[in-house]
Amino acid sequence: MTTHPDIQRLIGPLLEQDDELFAFEDYLAIRPVRHVLMALRLVRGGSKGEILAEMCPALLPQLEPGQRPLVPEPQFFWPYDRVWNLGEAEYPHNRQMKLKYHLIPEMKQYNRIVMFEAIARQYLAGQSIEYAECHTILDMTQGRFSFAVNGLATDPGGRICEFANAHSPGLGDRLREQGDDLPIGDKRALIAMLHERERNAVHALKLEKHWEPSPFPAEDKGLV
């Protein structure tokens, strides 16, 4: 966690009181970590020692190795304004109350939603490559491989196909061509690829002790 004493004093009591919270680098996050990392970045800003809190949940199978959970949108999704001013240094109690009774409960609420992709779909917008990747990944986790192809159509770089081809030769090309008609073995290979990407992201962020490996919805529903 950041070494700034103001932030340490702010989060220290919260970490002691709530075992669902953990800190890493500049982030306060919720455990268990599953497919989405619910993280809150805390930084000092302004001339009066304000602390700013920025929500930045990350879809783990989309993160590249070494990529931190704070990059330009649309890697993340959140239904409210992404940045809050927690207040000035002379009002430490107010800061803690905002975190404890507003931001942290919101993070926990979304961390407990099994159908995590519903959050992303509601608040993602636009047609950038990153949005298309996110939608493609979310469709695959649901077993909707033909819908995933729609995302590939707006991804001129074909990064998801590249990932899939690297995982298993020709896998991404077959996804683009066949969608839901993919053989069950190919569907399972795509799901395995997403699990591998999630594991790699967790390892790169050193979150293993907070991570709870979980099946994707397609696996829970017996679709793969």
Image: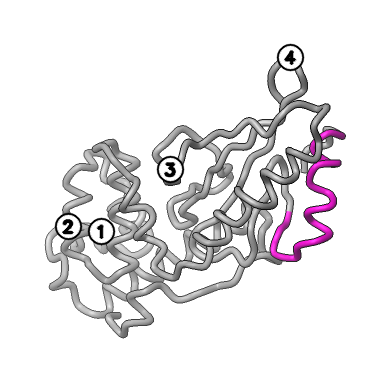
Instruction: Provide the residue designation for mark 2.
Output: 176
Instruction: Provide the residue designation for mark 1.
Output: 172
What colour-coding does the image apply? one colour
**Distance Cα–Cα, label 3 vs label 4:** 30 Å
Sequence-wise, which precedes: disc 4 or disc 2? 4
> Residue 85, relative to residue 188: is it above or below?
above
Q: Is residue 67 visible?
A: no
Amino acid beneath label 4: Ser
Where residue 45 sits in the image (x, y, percent)?
Answer: 69, 22
Numbered tag placed on residue 75 in the rendering: 3
> Are discs 2 and 1 less than 8 Å apart at CB?
yes
Which residue is farthest top? 47
Magenta stretch, residue numbers: 5-22
In front: label 3 or label 1: 3
The residue depicted at 62 percent of the width and 67 percent of the height is: 32
Sequence-wise, which precedes: disc 2 or disc 3? 3
Where residue 11 sits in the image (x, y, percent)?
Answer: 79, 46
Numbered tag placed on residue 47 in the rendering: 4
Q: Within 10 angstroms of label 4, few (less than 14), some, or many (20 or more) residues? A: few
Q: Within 10 angstroms of label 3, few (less than 14), some, or many (20 or more) residues? A: many
Amino acid beneath label 2: Arg
